[in-house]
Image (tube, coloured by chain):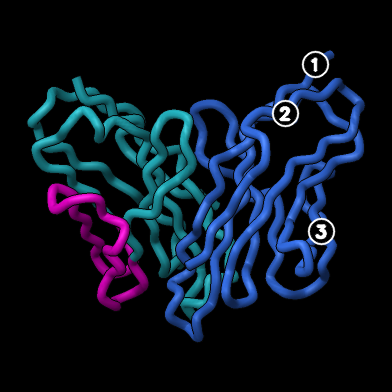
Chain colours: A cyan, B blue
């Protein structure tokens, strides 16, 4: 079946602009995660959605970052007033972890490479 | 809070040689452990996972890892390296605090594996 799909694959924008990144999870996966990967670094957790529960936003680095998810489908990550330090690859993952236990593997998309000029 | 340390940001081996990528974790509760591989310009692909069953875990592409609680380690090995194994490898941990962990992954910094002919 189809995997996690992210769009756009690449985004170049000017400092100060807003950007919106999209993630289509695997059908039936209730859990959805966003991570940020800066050059030469590991992945940082940003936000987690589980069904209709309130999202875990504990990883969002500032109030310029926000994310939404409609039910168990598409999610969008929005970055307002972008800064150069926002340049990174943004990865989305989904899993079938309905029990919030964390023992189900996460399936990753190919990411959106964001470059802020 | 949990953490992951990957020893060695770069590992270089000859084709046919043993691959050993080191991962140590820190967690106050029994962890779930994962190894992911990332090829250039792609997302992360799950190699294997430990979720409290057998301590020796076999994954895809001939990789395996052993969970050693006494050493808080989860090292990744492969008996004979192939050129196609060249990639970046990430060790990750999630924990279950009685259903409140949300499954978010904490990643190590990654190890770039180079395979020489």
| Residue occupying the point 59% across, 31% down | B39
Horizontal placement of B86 versus B44: left or right? right
Ranked by sequence position, the earlier of labels 1 and 3 is 3
Horizontal placement of A4 versus A17: left or right? right
* Mark 3 surroundings within 10 Å by alpha-carbon count, few (fewer than 14), some (14 through 19), many (20 or more): some
The segment highlighted magenta reads A49-74
**Closest to the observer, B97 or B43:** B97
| Residue occupying the point 15% across, 35% down | A82
Q: Is residue A55 above or below residue B19?
A: below
Answer yes or no: do the residues labelled 1 and 3 have beta carbons within 8 Å? no
User: In which quadrant will I find the C terminus of chain B?
Assistant: top right
Residues at discs 1 and 3 both on one chain:
yes
Residue B28 magenta-highlighted = no
Ranked by sequence position, the earlier of labels 2 and 1 is 2
Q: CA distance from mark 2 to mark 1?
A: 11 Å
User: Residue A31 is drawn in which quadrant?
Assistant: bottom left
Q: Which residue is mark 2?
A: B11
Ranked by sequence position, the earlier of labels 3 and 2 is 2
Label disc, if present, on residue B98 of the rendered structure = none
Label disc, if present, on residue B66 of the rendered structure = 3
SS at badge 2 = strand
Q: Is residue B41 above or below residue A93?
A: above
Q: Which residue is mark 1?
A: B116
SS at badge 3 = strand
Chain letter belonging to callout 3: B
> Which is closer to the viewer, label 2 or label 1?
2
Chain letter belonging to callout 2: B
User: Residue A81 is drawn in which quadrant?
Assistant: top left
Q: CA distance from mark 1 to mark 3?
A: 26 Å
């Amino acid at each position: 079946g189809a995997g996690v799909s992210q769009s756009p694959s690449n985004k170049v924008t000017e400092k100060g602009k807003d950007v919106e990144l999209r993630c289509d999870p695997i059908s039936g996966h209730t859990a959805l995660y966003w991570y940020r990967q800066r050059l030469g670094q590991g992945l940082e957790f940003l936000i987690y959605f589980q069904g209709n529960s309130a999202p875990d936003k504990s990883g969002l680095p500032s109030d310029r970052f926000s994310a939404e998810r409609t039910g168990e489908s598409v999610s969008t990550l929005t970055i307002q007033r972008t800064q150069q330090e926002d340049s990174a690859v943004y990865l989305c993952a989904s899993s079938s972890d309905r029990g919030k236990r964390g023992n189900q593997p996460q399936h990753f998309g190919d990411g959106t490479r964001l470059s802020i000029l | 809070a949990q953490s992951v340390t990957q020893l060695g940001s770069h590992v270089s081996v000859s084709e046919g040689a043993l691959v050993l990528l080191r991962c140590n974790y820190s967690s106050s509760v029994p962890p779930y452990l994962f190894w992911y591989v990332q090829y250039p310009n792609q997302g992360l692909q799950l190699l294997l996972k430990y979720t409290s069953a057998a301590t020796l875990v076999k994954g895809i592409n001939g990789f395996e890892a052993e969970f050693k609680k006494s050493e808080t380690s989860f090292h990744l090995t492969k008996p004979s390296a192939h050129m196609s194994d060249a990639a970046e490898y990430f060790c990750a941990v999630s924990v279950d605090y009685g259903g409140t962990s949300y499954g978010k992954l904490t990643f190590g910094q990654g190890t770039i594996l180079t395979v020489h002919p």
